[in-house]
């Protein structure tokens, strides 16, 4: 059994969890999330907490792996509906900027045409100016940790930071190892 999986997920006040067969719903002040329980695992409710257990007869490797994973996903759901998640990206480069048009974010990244990305429901976006530069930080917020991370990774993949000048889209606080280039190779 997983050490992480053995710890119960505490439900803070204002958060309700319902177990419906192989589906768990967590409802809180910021919204509601659903998750299908993977095979080999069972979830039960116990006095303001969720307890994850491995089913009898489950293969040890799959049961143990799903045990810890399910507990972590449930904990992320509880934290998401209480506090929410936030991920920010920086646009580094001359002329790189972002603007919002409804549910679309329009990115100017040095390509011939601007790139338009449609955002799914459940994610709110803010474009900020930092250090006197215009529209160079994108802040994603929402209650689903997986969705926030996936959208941030998709945006970063449009123009990943390059190692010579550091231009591109990077996570806020991410360090890019700079290469010396031809002039520094002497």
Image (cartoon, grey):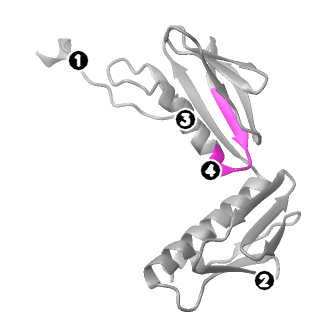
Residue at the extreme left of the image, as rendered? 186
**C-alpha span from label 1 to label 4:** 37 Å
User: Is 143 in the magenta?
Assistant: yes
Element type at mark 2:
loop
Question: Tag on residue 140?
Answer: none
Q: In this view, does 175 lie above or below 38?
A: above
Horizontally, residue 185 falls left or right of residue 163, namely left
x then y, percent, for residue 15: 85, 64
Question: Which residue is painted at 58% across and 43% down in the image?
Answer: 150
Q: Give the range drawn in magenta.
A: 138-147
Q: Earlier in the sequence, mark 1 or mark 2?
A: 2
Element type at mark 4:
helix
Question: Tag on residue 46?
Answer: 2
Q: Earlier in the sequence, mark 3 or mark 4?
A: 4
Q: Answer yes or no: do the residues labelled 3 and 4 have beta carbons within 8 Å?
A: no
In which image quadrant can residue 48 be found? Answer: bottom right
Question: Tag on residue 154?
Answer: 3
Label 3: few (<14), some (14–19) or many (≥20) C-alpha neighbours in 10 Å: few
Question: Tag on residue 146?
Answer: 4
**C-alpha span from label 2 to label 4:** 26 Å
In which image quadrant can residue 10 be found? Answer: bottom right
Q: Earlier in the sequence, mark 2 or mark 3?
A: 2
Which one is nearer the viewer's eye here, 88 or 155?
A: 155
Q: Answer yes or no: do the residues labelled 1 and 4 have beta carbons within 8 Å?
A: no
């Amino acid at each position: 059994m997983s050490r992480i999986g053995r710890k119960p997920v505490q439900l803070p006040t204002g958060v309700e969890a319902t177990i419906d067969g192989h589906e768990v719903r967590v409802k809180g002040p910021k919204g509601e999330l659903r998750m299908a329980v993977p095979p080999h695992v069972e979830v039960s409710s116990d006095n303001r907490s969720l307890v994850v257990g491995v089913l009898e007869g489950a293969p040890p490797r799959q049961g143990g792996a799903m045990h810890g994973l399910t507990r972590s996903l449930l904990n992320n759901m509880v934290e998401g509906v209480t506090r929410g998640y936030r991920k920010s990206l920086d646009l580094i480069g001359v002329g790189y900027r972002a603007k919002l048009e409804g549910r679309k974010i329009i990115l100017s990244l040095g390509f011939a045409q601007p790139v338009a990305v449609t955002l799914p429901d459940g994610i709110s976006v803010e474009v900020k100016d930092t250090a006197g530069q215009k529209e160079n930080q994108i802040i994603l917020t929402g209650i689903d940790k997986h969705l926030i991370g996936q959208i941030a990774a998709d945006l970063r993949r449009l123009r990943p930071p390059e190692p010579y000048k550091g231009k591109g889209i990077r996570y806020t606080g991410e360090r890019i190892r700079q290469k010396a280039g031809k002039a520094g190779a002497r």
